[in-house]
Image (cartoon, rainbow, N blue to C red):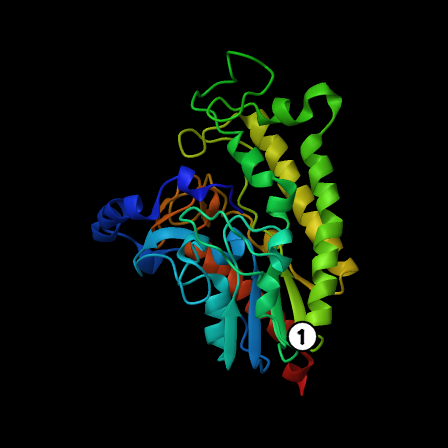
Amino acid sequence: MTIRPLASLVTLTAAVPLVGALLLAPTAVGTAVSAPAPQERRLPVVMEYVALGDSWTADVVLVDRYGLPDTTHAPIDCAQSKQNYPKIVAEALSVTEFRDASCGSATTQDFRRPQDGLPLGGTNPPQFDRLSPTTDLVTVGIGGNDAGIAGAGLDCLNLLPAPNPVSDSGPGLPLGGCKAKYTAGGKDRLAERIRASEIKVVKALRQIHRRAPRARILVMDYLDVVPDHGCYPTLPATDEDMAYISAKFRQLNKMVHRAARRGGAEVVNTYRQSAGHDLCQAPQVRWAETYGPSVNDPAVGVPAHPNAAGARAQAAYLLQHLRDTDPDVYQ
């Protein structure tokens, strides 16, 4: 997930000098914690794979050891990583045709309409346009931006290692108070947005079935990287705010699971399997970054998004799901 505009965080070109220092600095990429090795089971045969989704599918990056974001499948300002989980999966499956439609800040609306207004002026065509009647695998990661949880998460960030001293009304970034902001008046508006997003995801999945009737549809939920406490300075937020946004993140994932069932899709449960890799963990352990710069691998990504280790974990869990559930592996 990401919020518009991405350029408000940092431009692609401005990030290039910053990553230089990371690329030249000593790293422990070789010893970085990776996702559990999958069991040795045969992967299914996939001929045409299409990936749809938001920034947690694009595994958005501004610049990394491979350079600027990938433009093979989408505009540069979608910020697709050259090593996001769909690309890792496509390579592992040796698919004949692969199309990655994912884009930072995408919502379900961007599945059926062009996503314009991207940070550098680009437009991502409707993500559904990449589907075809011969598509036999579709992965989907969507719902967070429909619910607005990314912006709410940034509203939790507090530059002061104490509750906001100015007001208890929840001013948001950079003084935190996300719980107060979204629950003012006794109504949890973020919870309401999450509930309202479910039918949007369901309708999107049903449309995928119509456009790609032969496809297995796998819905990816969101990694368990949002802790229920702050950890200054790595994650500058109060425990109260983090407990709130962590609970909303769990609610988001439960909504995604319900929508998948209603929409006739399978669920790849990355949340349940990724505990212990949250934003407060050591640099070579965490699977997402609060600020963006990462040593796992060297990169400048987008705040509060998966890093390269997170992308590898997403891919590993997806591939294991295919091994465990495809009937061909038992023949």
Q: Residue at x 60, y 17 (%)?
A: 169
| Residue 265, above or below 250 | below
Q: Residue at x 66, y 84 (%)?
A: 328
| Residue 94, above or below 101 | below
Near-viewer residue (90 or 35): 90
User: Which residue is farthest right?
Assistant: 262
On the picture, is 230 further left or further right than 63?
Answer: right
Residue 43: name its quadrant. bottom right
Residue 237 x, y percent position in the rendering: 50, 28
Q: Which residue is mark 1?
A: 215
Residue 182 x, y percent position in the rendering: 65, 27
* Label 1 crowd bin: few (<14), some (14–19), many (20+), radius 10 Å: many
On the picture, is 25 further left or further right than 94?
Answer: left
Residue 133 x, y percent position in the rendering: 66, 78
| Residue 289, above or below 125 | above
Residue 110: name its quadrant. bottom right
User: Which residue is farthest bottom?
Assistant: 331
| Residue 200, above or below 178 | below
Regarding mark 1 in the picture, which secondary structure is present there? loop
Q: Residue at x 55, y 36 (%)?
A: 151
Near-viewer residue (20 or 316): 20
Near-viewer residue (300 or 41): 300
Could you tell me which quadrant the C terminus lies in? bottom right
Q: Residue at x 38, y 49 (%)?
A: 284
